[in-house]
Image (cartoon, rainbow, N blue to C red):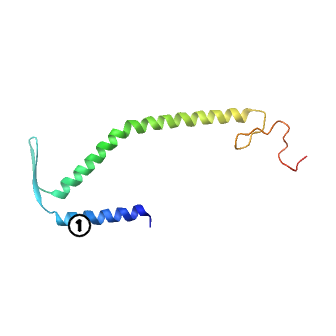
Amino acid sequence: MSWKVIVFFILAVLLVIFTVQNQILLNLKFFHWEITDVPVVYILLSGLIFGFLLASMMQLPRILKLKRELKKVVTELKKSEEIIATKDELVDSEGVSMGSEYKGGFFNE
């Protein structure tokens, strides 16, 4: 098994143990809203999920910028490959020109 799967299962077991051991019920107040008898685990899990979503939203502009830059580089790369392909000289996969007199092999004459 992958080490990521093993770590996931260990964290899942720890979460189950934490849930079983902390069945305390709390009353939650937020401005004028009040929720009664909420387990501690639900409060902690909702806080973790909210924090994850907030962190993801903070990184979203950077991710979009990097995707735009990647798209720009890919289009420039395709343009440069088209320019190389339109030349009269034969160019191999490493971009090395073989010259106009190249016949295609070492033993070919």
On screen, residue 94 above or below 13: above
Residue at 57 percent of width and 34 percent of height: 75
Image spot of residue 60 (x, y percent): 37, 39
Q: Residue at x 70, y 34 (%)?
A: 84
Quadrant housing the N terminus: bottom left
Q: Is the residue 100 above or below the residue 45 in the image? A: above
Residue 69 at least partly seen: yes
Q: Outermost residue, right direction? A: 109
Residue 71 in the figure: left or right of residue 43: right
Relative image position of residue 94 (x, y in whole percent): 70, 43
Location of residue 13 (image quadrant): bottom left
- The crowd level at tag 1 (other Cα within 10 Å; few <14, some 14-19, many 20+) is few
**Residue 83: quarter of image:** top right
Residue 87's x, y, as percent? 75, 32
Q: Which residue shows up at 12% across the image and 61% down it? A: 24
**Element at label 1:** helix
At a point 35% along the width and 62% down the height, the residue shown is: 8
Q: Quadrant of residue 95?
A: top right
Decide if residue 36 is in sight here. Answer: no
Question: Residue 39 at x, y = what percent?
Answer: 15, 58
Write down the residue under mark 1.
17
- Left or right of 61? Residue 88 is right
Between 32 and 23, the residue placed more toward the observer is: 23
How many numbered markers are drawn? 1
- Please state which amino acid type lies under the numbered disc 1: Ile
